Amino acid sequence: MTAVLALLLALQSGPQIEKVERLVGNVNRPLLWTPLKVTLTSATDFSGDVVVRSRFGFSIARAVTLKAGNHESILLPALDPDEIVAGKATFKMPKDFVRPDRIVLVDARLPYAGDLVSTNQVLYQKISAEDLEKTLPRGLLEAADLVLVKEGPGTLAATREDAERALGALKEHAPSLEAVDGPLWMQAPPSGWVPAKRAWTLFFATMYVFAAFVALAVIAKRFPKFGLACTGAVALLGVVGYWQFPRGQAWVVGQAVTVVPPAGAASEQRTWFVHCAKEIPAATFEFPRLVKPIFPTMGGTDDPFTLRVNDRGSSVEGLLLRPGRPACFGGVESVAASEPSGTPALSVLVKGGEPEGLAAGSDDFKTWKRFVGRDGRFSVAGGGDRPAGRVKSSDLADEHERPPIFIRTQP
Amino acid sequence: MRFPPLQKSAALHLAWIGGLCGAVILMLADFLPYRLPFAGPDGFFAAVLSLELFFVLLVWPLFVPSLLREGIPAPMVLIEVAVLLLFGLPLVLIAANVTGVDAGSVLRGQVLVAALAALGAGVAARFRPALPWYYLAAFWLSAAHPFWAFLGDQMGAASPRISVYLSPFWGAVARDASPAWVQAAVYGLGGVALLALPSRKAAA
């Protein structure tokens, strides 16, 4: 009897997944964030990860600490989730999707929130102010067509009439970074040398030969008694040169795209291509914001990795990088709209869906034109790549950013 | 034995550093209208190692007689070889990092360079009139054997399997470590033995 009880207790130990809710409703938008609210309970103390396994082949993890007997609800970003794992507990995500034309998230504080009834065309999904605050600024509600709020970022709709007006004015779904983006991958930088290593090797070779000439052919010849010291100094210069050489095998090329809508806050879409010159079996990269992997095809990845999220940024762990096979990550954040000064290197005006100018054929415009919409202006800042230091990794030798892109959309 | 006056070997040191660095600059600075296929990160270590081998096989023996004229005993010429390796080490280590080769491969390559330098020094010090034959042999082993093997690979011509154990450049960049070690042992011992021989003047 005691043994049976012990066995039952052992089976019950660890967290149990009590409930899983999709914050944007049971909709299938696999390329966009569909955050989940996972409620956990545990008979014993638990400290570990809650992991969402995506059908794209990677996982999203969040650390959680749970006291015995407590319930805890955590928000987890998800991209086409397949199952959720917490300790030994597993929850398979159902596929009972509804297929509305529009998804409208409604701030639960709004007085009419309970009166809205979903139809086949419009899905109304209530969301608490707390969840709204945690998800909207991080771009996690991008699957929704409209977010009606009482205050703060989103569409302010104090009355039901305001809400209906906003719904009636809706055009296309607002563009956002998607988990599969073929045109973006056309922008992937070529593989080969780590740029910093190439530049440093060239710099070192030039300085080394110059210093050797000055030391051995000028100083040692003029002051023979310092000849041996000059020889030693050249050797020392070589040692110092190697000491300063960037040793990491990975490099990152980033680009920021600021999108300024006619009304509301501007957003900054930022992408990072991660390259390597030599295979790195399990690289870790820390990003300053929540990022999603962006794949070239719907096949996702065959080499699983973990995207670890916290309240602010995110990190990618266990990423297998091979030469010639980069990875791409992207994330969005609200920013203050500020158009870059100076003459743009490339500018395209779009009127009624028709781009004007020769630059309309550029790869940059083709990649980002869906963000411009039917009327707007697209410009790429002048100048070349600039060094950056946003991404952290022990394998990183170099990070630089391409000239930023600025998009102003018009109503 | 007298320690060689290193400061008097400025021409040698400059030729070594200038040759290595100049070739690296040519490979990387996009002076040419196209990018050299062997100048990519995958082949950079092999390129730098080949540059070192080229120098010690073909250029270094020409400097040996002038070093001996300074009155340095022939075996002490090996000190100069060590200094050359020290000067070249930063570039070799950078190349090793770029290509991602391990310390064992770096050591193997440098031992082979030292061994071939010893052989070249030995021939130049003890059998100077035989230097043209040395160059002919170096050409034959370095170029003809790999070409012969290439023909064998492409056209089915029979080529000796031992070629990789004879050809310095091929042995240095071969995936298998044994050809480089065998060459280093054979050429190195040969070179040291030649340098240890009494000079013909002294013998006379």
Image (tube, coloured by chain):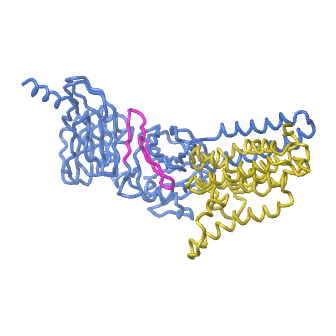
Chain colours: A blue, B yellow
Could you tell me residue A409's position as x and y percent?
46, 52
Numbered disc total? 0
Left or right of A263? Residue A245 is: right
Q: Give the camera-side residue of B93 and A280.
A: B93
Left or right of A259? Residue A385 is: right
Left or right of A328? Residue A124 is: left
The residue located at (35%, 57%) in the rendering is: A299
Could you tell me residue B156's position as x and y percent?
56, 75
Q: Give the camera-side residue of A157 and B144.
A: B144
Q: Is residue A311 magenta?
A: yes
Could you tell me residue B80's position as x and y percent?
79, 43
Could you tell me residue A268's position as x and y percent?
47, 44
Residue A222, visible in the rendered structure: yes
Q: Give the camera-side residue of A79 and B196.
A: B196
User: Is A274 drawn above or below residue A39 in the view shown?
Assistant: below
Left or right of B192? Residue A80 is: left
**Image quarter in which the N terminus of chain B is found:** top right
Residue A262, visible in the rendered structure: no
Q: Give the camera-side residue of B177 and A276.
A: B177
Q: Is residue A52 magenta?
A: no
The residue located at (73%, 57%) in the rendering is: B54
- Name the magenta segment's main secondary structure: strand
User: Is A172 drawn above or below residue A90 in the view shown?
Assistant: below
The residue located at (81%, 46%) in the rendering is: B13
Q: Residue furthest front?
A: B204
Q: Residue furthest left?
A: A1
Magenta residues (range): A304-332
